[in-house]
Amino acid sequence: MLMIAVIALLICGGYLIALKVKPTTVPGHFRKAATIIFFVAIGFIVKPFDIVPTGNKGLLFTFGSISNNIKEPGLVFRLPFIQEIKLITLRPIQLDYRVDVGPSGAITKDNQTIGATIVFFYKYNENSLVEMYTKYGEEKIKSIVTKTGLESFKMDIGNYDIFSLPVRQEEIRRNTLAMVREKMASYPVEITELKITNYDWSDEFDRQISETMHRAQQVKQKEQELLITEQEARKKVKTAEADKQALITTAEGEKAAAQLRADAKALEGDGIRKYNEAVQKNMQLEIQIRKLEIEKIKAEKWNGQYVPTNNYGPIPLSTGKIQPE
């Protein structure tokens, strides 16, 4: 745009000068147009105005001296060659920094060197722009934020051992952000956000991790083998106990069965004995009954005569009747 204005200024200026030196019959409206273009071109070259974009404010300098007259977004007029407008953004400024593993890295509680990528976000206080630029300047503020952030990060890392970093990254970020904000409270800036990513450590620690993991795997394998052995032993013990209990149960069952068989035999013998006794009693009773029946028959058949007992001689005959006494 500036180049076009310069070219237009040269053409129109030369044209107007030529008209003064050697007047011609050129129509008046061409002369007016050339005159307007000439002054517009001068305006673009001299630039008596500036535009402050949205999200920015303008610091006004007069002969290099800053003014308290802060310019709002929009079209801003100034005195050419005397005043200057410098734009200051009000949006958060991103500042990336890499902490390398080594002498400049962060040291953990267990003396391990840690590296990381730190991203700062900060913005200027709207009411302190003149103070910020007068006392510090943008580059100085950037340097202060960087230095303060790194010191806070290293200080907080010293509270942790390297093994706790993977699970406590968010806690470290919050602690570091709180420390940075506290230390920057007296400066005309606000720390809006802080991110810590891509943690790194030394190659030596990588080797230590590999060796530790290898040993841990060996220990784990031994523990698994021991666990399997213990499980097999417990299985054998339980099997033996089960076999023992089975034998005991079988023996107790056989004992109970034998007892039952003995009891059954005893009951059977007692029944036979009682049966025989009953049979014998019945037989004696039968004999008595039979004897009574025989006596009855004898009594019914006896004629009243005495029959002597002669076991060795002939039975004497008697013709007389037995006399009653």
Image (cartoon, rainbow, N blue to C red):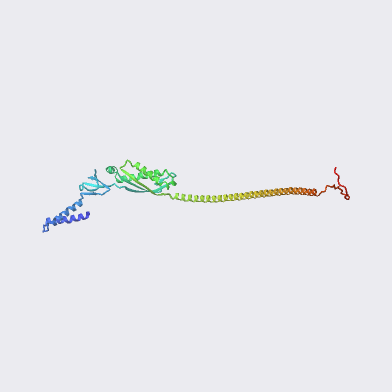
Classify the position of the N terminus by image quarter: bottom left
Residue 244 placement, left or right of 182: right
Is residue 99 in view?
no
Depth order, front residue of 318/7? 318
Residue 29 placement, left or right of 132: left
On the image, the x and y values in percent for residue 251 come to 64, 49
Is residue 40 in view?
yes
On the image, the x and y values in percent for residue 119 come to 35, 48
On the image, the x and y values in percent for residue 161 come to 44, 45
Identity of the residue drawn at 46% across and 50% down? 209
Classify the position of the C terminus by image quarter: top right
Up the image or down, 30 lies above or below 323; here it is below
Identity of the residue drawn at 40% across and 43% down? 156
How many badges with numbers are in the image?
A: 0
Depth order, front residue of 281/121? 281
Residue 143 placement, left or right of 249: left
Depth order, front residue of 25/220? 220
Residue 58 placement, left or right of 147: left
On the image, the x and y values in percent for residue 204 come to 45, 49
Residue that lies at the very extreme toward the top in this rendered image: 186
